[in-house]
Image (tube, coloured by chain):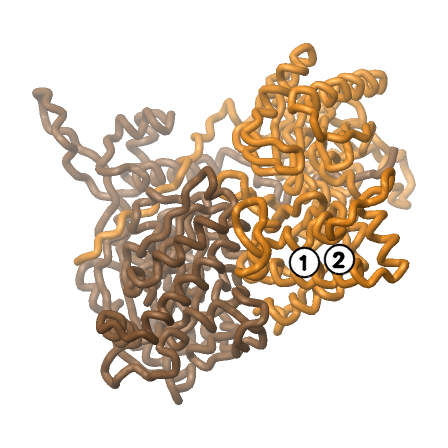
Chain colours: A orange, B brown
């Protein structure tokens, strides 16, 4: 009988599980339980939760301790008599992840350790106009070297680096970053060339995506599905669904700034009309009135709004409404109920939220029975660089054997 | 140094791999390779691709043959002398999946076997106005019984059923299906009650999602990321990303019909304004002129358009434009480059595509360097019921041991 429908094809049939893989799989299993634990966890508890034998746990713990992936720590005293119990927890020495960010107001570098603690955070204000990509990335390479040197003194070794850029990326190439005047810039190759002496694997990723991951980690995964809106010169979004970043088919998801708000609206430099960007970017809110020298655009907008300047208040109102319309479409498509306002929008949230919320409540279909939340993000403008560093260290958290065998690849 | 960021918490640390699990894991691995193979695959090839030993393959093949999951088939002759080689391929007997669909024009039932071939397809025209959910689902239960009886004669056993409904679903409850006049209807419980004698596990899922899965399978997974638009009384979308259905945080993704096209547009019954639905539903295109009795709305629209009726041509133009505007936002958010027009839209595609494509080309940011495609879906109005049946059988394709041990749960 027709139609004949071909059966589903699993994309990647798994690898066979053989005896020699068990050792690695079980080590990674134990390590992930240590990562997931809220605090130190005893060998006995690890045996119970993993179902592995106590001798196996002991052997794996020795290996992890020797590799500086974990450390021994006192457990909370259980109240019973006897010697204090000893637990295992993530090490604050050993492998570290480096994050680098090219943002509207300058360059940033960040190092986190295995526990996710920020151990180094540096910022260099910078104006991009007239500076080429090699120049900008050369400056960033210098900051990377300084960060690696600084944390070496604390017995930390950077294993891999992640670079945040404000635009869609594929294979290290920034396809379009109007804020920087970049088009098809191979940022990965340029940064690798500038950091050749450091011998670092480098990944390049969209800044809104990385900022969303930063927020995910910062919130301790308490919120596992949300849209992170990164406001600034442009407007991008990072989508976290069920605890995972949704990057799209080619890593170009979340182009919220170019979602149409009014089909017949103002022309946008992208070639379309009525894009959210034309209503809610910092430039649109400033409405051609430049910010005073030495003030950031956010500070200029806030000062004018607080002084009751009618044009600024009207611009903020219409930005909030446009943001709400574009976000409503996004939530209707994605089925996500929480929006975090990040980047510049975290500083302007009090002026934008009310109008945006009114549109969300009216336009999101499921809001009729499942409320929608919109609030400022937890991390400030450092979200992307912290997210980048956490993404780097996450490779070791997921695959500790890569560190143990020092065969880290990206 | 602050801020302290909590480490990522893997959601579900994997189960430990122990000797007793190896048997199941390897059986499922071998089976998935047989599923993925384009045709019969020999035991020798299976040993090569899985890395398992020949005796292990032989033992697993015996188990799968005994369970009617696979069958032996002649391989294409390699041209060399010697006895013809024998391969293993999916069985056309044994487990089968049942799909049920409540669609605009009636009720449908479908059974597919393990190979994904449709073995039974039944349709009953039906009008829903004035009929309650128990009545509709009772009718569908009768069709399920008839399907199961019919295919039993072909040595097929239905293992599980999937019901397609036109609206957002959670835990078997249809939250809102205006086309049926349903609100918070526990379709899962009602259908389970009506099919108690059949003892079938039942899953309820949105029809656009299931139709998208039907298209994914029908295309032989050649296209692994696309948006499937299901046009009809309402407008929904199924999102397939990297070969997987993107259901959203609660299974309510793809509410394309309620994406805003014009913020100040006509009121929509959902409570919002300017929703795509108000421009591009069949009712909007018919523009209050009812279809003649006995003609489907699609046929009425096509007849009027072909006769050059100005109002109908204008309505189709504006529906295509509105569809393009809403889809542009969707593609900007999701980073997907292909749209399949399904349901009623597959029949009207020639009248809608040109205007929709013009908007997509202008409004999708990445279209500047990566073209967007919009075309009719492969499967006609049966996409959802076929997708539902394939979803049912896929449980066995993914976990054949559930069939072997007859412990199928959903």
Q: Residue at 31% x, 56% y: name it.
A: B376
Q: Residue at 82% x, 45% y: name it.
A: A291
Outermost residue, left side: B81
Quadrant in which residue A133 is drawn: top right
Cβ atoms at labels 2 and 1 below 8 Å apart: yes
Vertical side of B234 occupied by A70: above or below: above
The spot of residue B295 in percent (x, y) is 24, 79
Crowd band around label 1 with a 10 angstrom C-alpha radius: few (<14), some (14–19), many (20+): some
Q: Residue at 53% x, 35% y: name it.
A: B17
- Give the residue pinned by disc 2: A375
Q: The C terminus of chain A lies in which quarter of the figure?
A: top right
The spot of residue A219 in percent (x, y) is 75, 48
Outermost residue, top side: A197
Q: Earlier in the sequence, mark 2 or mark 1?
A: 1
The spot of residue A32 in percent (x, y) is 66, 36
Q: Nearer the viewer, residue A78 or A144?
A: A144
| Dot 1: element | strand
Q: Nearer the viewer, residue A337 or A185?
A: A185
Tell me the distance, in whole angstroms, between the alpha carbons under discs 2 and 1.
8 Å
- Give the residue pinned by disc 1: A338
Residue A44 visible to an observer of this rendering: no
Residue A200 visible to an observer of this rendering: yes
């Amino acid at each position: 009988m027709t139609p004949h429908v071909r059966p589903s094809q699993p994309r990647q049939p798994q690898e066979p599980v053989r005896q020699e893989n068990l050792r690695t799989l079980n080590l990674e299993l134990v390590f992930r339980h240590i990562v997931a634990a809220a605090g130190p966890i005893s060998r006995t508890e690890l045996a119970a939760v993993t179902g592995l034998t106590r001798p196996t746990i002991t052997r794996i713990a020795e290996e992890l301790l020797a590799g500086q992936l974990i450390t021994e720590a006192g457990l909370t005293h259980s109240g019973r008599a006897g010697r204090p119990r000893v637990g295992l927890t993530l090490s604050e020495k050993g492998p570290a992840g480096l994050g680098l960010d090219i943002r509207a107001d300058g360059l940033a570098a960040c190092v986190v350790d295995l526990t996710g603690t920020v151990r180094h955070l540096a910022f260099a204000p910078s104006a991009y106009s007239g500076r080429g990509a090699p120049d900008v990335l050369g400056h960033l390479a210098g900051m990377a070297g300084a960060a690696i040197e600084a944390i070496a003194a604390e017995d930390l070794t950077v294993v891999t680096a992640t670079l945040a850029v404000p635009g869609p990326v594929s294979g290290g190439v920034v396809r379009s970053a109007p804020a920087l005047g970049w088009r098809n810039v191979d940022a990965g190759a340029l940064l690798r060339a500038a950091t050749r002496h450091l011998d670092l694997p480098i990944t390049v990723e969209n800044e809104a995506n990385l900022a969303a991951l930063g927020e995910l980690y910062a919130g301790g995964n308490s919120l596992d599905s949300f849209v992170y809106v990164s406001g600034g010169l442009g407007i991008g979004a990072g989508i976290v669904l069920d605890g995972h970043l949704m990057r799209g088919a080619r890593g170009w998801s979340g182009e919220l700034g170019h979602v149409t708000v009014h089909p017949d609206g103002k022309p946008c430099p992208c070639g379309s009309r009525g894009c959210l960007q034309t209503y809610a970017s910092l430039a649109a809110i400033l409405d051609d009135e430049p910010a005073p020298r030495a003030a950031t655009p956010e500070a200029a907008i806030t000062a004018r709004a607080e002084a009751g300047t009618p044009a600024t208040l009207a611009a903020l109102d219409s930005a909030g409404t446009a943001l709400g319309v574009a976000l409503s479409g996004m939530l209707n498509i994605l089925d996500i109920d929480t929006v975090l306002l990040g980047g510049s929008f975290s500083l302007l949230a009090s002026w934008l939220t009310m109008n945006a919320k009114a549109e969300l409540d009216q336009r999101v279909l499921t809001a009729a029975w499942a409320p929608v939340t919109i609030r400022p993000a937890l991390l400030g403008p450092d979200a992307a660089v912290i997210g980048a560093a956490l993404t780097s260290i996450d490779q070791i958290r997921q695959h500790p054997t890569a560190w143990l065998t020092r065969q880290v690849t990206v």
